[in-house]
Image (spheres, coloured by chain):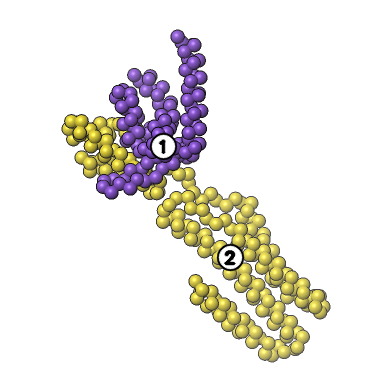
Amino acid sequence: MIDKIRAYLDNAFENAPKTRRMEDLKEELYSNLVEKYNDRLKHGLSEEDAYNTVIRGIGNIDELIDSVREPSPLAPTPVQETSARAIRTAVAVALYIMSPFLVILIDNTAGIGAMFAAIAAATGLLIYNGMTRKSYVRTEDTIVEEFKEWHVNNSRQRDAVNAFKGAFWSITVAIYLLVSFIFRIWSFSWIIFIIAVAIENIVKGILALKE
Amino acid sequence: MSITADMIRGHTDTIILRELLDKDSYGYEINKAIQEKTDNQYELKEATLYTAFRRLEQAGYIQSYWGDETTGARRRYYTITEEGRAQYQNAIADWAHAKLLIDKLIL
């Protein structure tokens, strides 16, 4: 008969979300119902009658399950925030593209300074975008939730990495143009790109090792 | 009897807080105490009882913890908080007031 109580609960909770709170409720109900059932037996009821009084005494179990159901997680990001994010990214990309031309437009050190300022601003924007991405707050204690949390944190990291990469390559292009213009070494200054690839991969390797 | 049951049901939260004033307890024990106090005339439905536990816990009036029974299923115990004690005092003050007014109105 105790098996029947378990079966009754399994059936009642079949469509309930598999959350920690729900499992706790089920476990709590089960232990209390079994104790009640055993008490009824002690008072001289037959197994059949004891089971029936216990089940009848539960009342509206669906209402109870509903009271433990949690509101749906992960509210979508507001549109406003998404578009602000897109604008920041667009501005950053524009700054990257324009930065080498600042050197050509403005003479001497002022041009170089302007270029690095533009790159710094663009990188700052991208990093800001990455850091302000909402970190995911787990609302339920399930594996799915854990995955979502991991996923969001992972893409935050990716945003930061992309920002640094963007800055790195802009600076490389800038140095290439600068050095080539100033020293007129177009014939072999392209080697800087190969060096840049090497540096990028070394950094990647170091980061991978750290993890 | 059913009107009486409806009236009592409105005080489920206070009844539970009252049972927890003296000592920590768990679902069936509380329900058993209610039955004994009322000479088997009243008993809470499990659905009502456990919904009330969740509601009281959410409000911060009670807290729960799992017992460490070595044999059989684990019990979930409830303990009353300071806020819960204050809420209990409010509830009985309300009740005393309501009783006074109802007596005046219907006796």
Q: Position of residue A25 (x, y in %)?
A: 37, 43
Counting from the top left corner in percent of width and height, residue B57 is at: 45, 39
For the residue carrying disc 2, how many other residues have a C-alpha within 10 Å: few (<14), some (14-19), or many (20+)? Answer: some
Residue depicted at x 52% and y 59%: A152
Q: Which residue is mark 1?
A: B53
Task: Give the structural element (helix, strand or loop) at label 1.
Answer: helix
| Chain letter of the residue beneath label 1 in the structure image | B
Letter of the yellow chain = A
Q: CA distance from mark 2 to mark 1?
A: 44 Å
Side of A38 relative to A158 (left or right): left
Residue nearer the viewer, B22 or B102: B22
- Between residue B78 and residue A25, name the one nearer to us: B78
Q: Would you identify the image quadrant in which residue A38 lies?
A: top left
Q: Label 2 amino acid?
A: Asp
Q: For the point 38% across and 19% down, which residue is it?
A: B3
Q: Position of residue A192 (x, y in %)?
A: 65, 84
Label placed on residue A159: 2
Of the chain colours in the picture, the one used for chain B is purple
In-front residue for pair A140/A76: A140
